[in-house]
Amino acid sequence: MSTNAGVTPLLDRIRSPQDLRSLEHLELVRLADELRAETLKVVSETGGHLGSSLGVIELTIAIHAVFDTPHDKLLWDVGHQCYPHKILTGRRERMSSLRKKGGISGFTRRSESPYDPFGAAHSSTSISAGLGFSVGFDLTGEEGHVVCVIGDGAMSAGMAFEALNNAGCLGRRLIVILNDNDMSISPSTGALARHLSNIRQITDAPEAAASGRLNLFQNLGLRYVGPVDGHDLDTLLPLLRSLKEADPGPILLHAVTRKGAGYHHAEAAPDRFHGVNPFDILSGTQVKTPAKAPAYTKVFANALIAEARRDERIVGITAAMAAGTGIDIFQKEFPDRCFDVGIAEQHAVTFAAGLAASGMKPFCAIYSSFLQRAYDQIVHDVALQNLPVRFAIDRAGLVGADGPTHAGAFDIGYLANLPNFTVMAASDEAELVHMVATAAAHDSGPIAFRYPRGEGTGISLPAEGQAIQIGRGRIIESGRHVALLSFGTRLAECLSARRMLADYGISVTVADARFAKPLDTALIAELFSSHELLVTIEEGATGGFGALVLHYLAQKGMLDGRSAIRTLTLPDHFIAQASPDDMYDEARLTARHIAGQVRGALAPHVSEAINGHNRARGGHQDAMPQVHRAEDRG
């Protein structure tokens, strides 16, 4: 039971929305206060998405009170505002595990509850999925309602308008609630934001808001209702009941809300309280572990600023993630050379392509998991035309509490197989500085560099970035028996594995590939031919860097009865939320797993050869164990 028990008497009675529907109107109003207090308490202890959840308290109660969920389908766009929904749908007792290993997700998840009919975490999908549910009801002859809640920031994405266009054409029963708080993570941008602002300024009764003039949504064939106060249950409850009984056809209810509503710290700084660490409710002070090294994101931003000071053609682009990508830092110095295009990754990439074609040097800074939303634009508008767009790919690899929806697992494979592309990965923050310089200097085609979330290694940063020779890796430590070829920040784990393996008399070379495309084929051939075993390591899915190395060796006939090779990648399944360390442990990409893979891969005759080689060199190491047991293989 929540520790709020006793001070939340109404909420304590709610085990499912069915209980909610038995409450009187005034009890629902009081319940909103209790649910807001409970949400605030939970997130203060676990961290997570606070502002968005506080902004939909009344909407959540009203929807569940009026509609017959889970039979009626409620879809939350993005899903980061779903904490009150989870509390009301039987998951209150598990909220302390929010975003933790083995706990409940910070987003909606079909496998978690029947009240989550469609999973989410990326934006602008709810209307398309909701329309699918609506058509499904019609085709099966089943009665039911579909309600989609989408924020004004998510509404800026093209996919949302594609769905509205289709919904207006099909004319099926669908209720879209536009949760308009004038924010995504930071304030919304673009012409749509201005259009919504103009609508908000009209204070006439619902459906008279357009004053005889059709607004955008009406022109698309939706019945428009609003704007209404999204925090006023006296308005929301009767209005939703009337919409539930309305004639079939798509309806857009425009609800104006405040991000962080009811918590003064969040209302005063909604961007700072979008996603939070655990915090003190009274002061709003967040608990943060002192940084041991600068974050990769900040290193990128400062390196980009340094390059932009030298080259006025450099511009920065982001898709509604200015703070998350560090572009906000760049924007402070170069406001006229910085563009936040909203939640519109497809547009961002082709916009960057147009800038490149005009002679500018665009740096498109997007999370790995969001960049995949723009793959056709990457192929058709950038790679095919060989335009020098620079892709700064943040959040590469496993990211922690946001889980598999935000993991940067696939960009190596989906970029390195494209003609004309150059693909790099930084092994530490100093390398990232040099890769920003490399990208700035590279005008012969598109180039991408990836780097993870979180702090760097603490290595000294160069005073100035230097362009790296394209397609050239580097040897970090030399050895004789085994070569570990790392692509990305697993390099530190490879160095730790090297020290572990030295205890078994195994001498290890550690190399930093730097490039997945073009490969440093000379380095690969040297490592493969001069060691008994070559192991590639990457923070990406199968079909990435290791596959490219294998392909090269196979094409050259070097795999025909020669040295052994292993490729270590992320496993072929989605890894659930946990700390990054726990996630990489599950992925078997830690130092002990790398060392275990090496020991397991060395065949007995190879082990004997290494032991004999050590003895011949006068080494006094114990004979290397003959590793055959499965449990000893990492």
Image (spheres, rainbow, N blue to C red):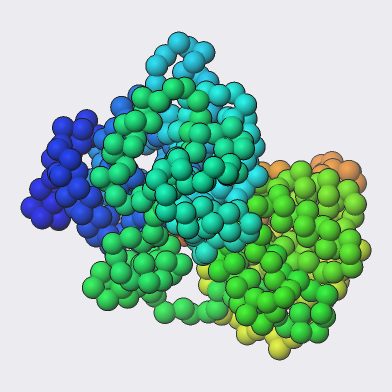
Is 305 above or below relative to 180?
A: below
Q: Which residue is drawn at 69% across and 66% down?
A: 339
Residue 195 in picture, x, y percent from top left: 58, 54
Q: Which residue is drawn at 71% across and 56% down?
A: 348
Residue 549 in picture, x, y percent from top left: 78, 50
Residue 77 visible in the picture: yes
Residue nearest the viewer, comparing 9 with 242: 242
Residue 516 in picture, x, y percent from top left: 77, 56
Is 295 above or below relative to 102?
A: below
Question: Residue 303's image quarter?
Answer: bottom right
Residue 595 in picture, x, y percent from top left: 57, 57
Residue nearest the viewer, comparing 303 with 11: 11
Q: Residue at x 66, y 82 (%)?
A: 333
Q: Is residue 540 left or right of residue 22?
A: right
Q: Which residue is drawn at 77% across and 57% down?
A: 351
Is 273 above or below relative to 312?
A: above
Q: Is residue 149 left or right of residue 123?
A: left
Q: In this view, does 267 lie to the left or right of 407?
A: left
Q: Is residue 392 left or right of residue 100?
A: right
Residue 411 visible in the picture: no
Residue nearest the viewer, comparing 268 with 493: 268
Question: Residue 498's image quarter?
Answer: bottom right
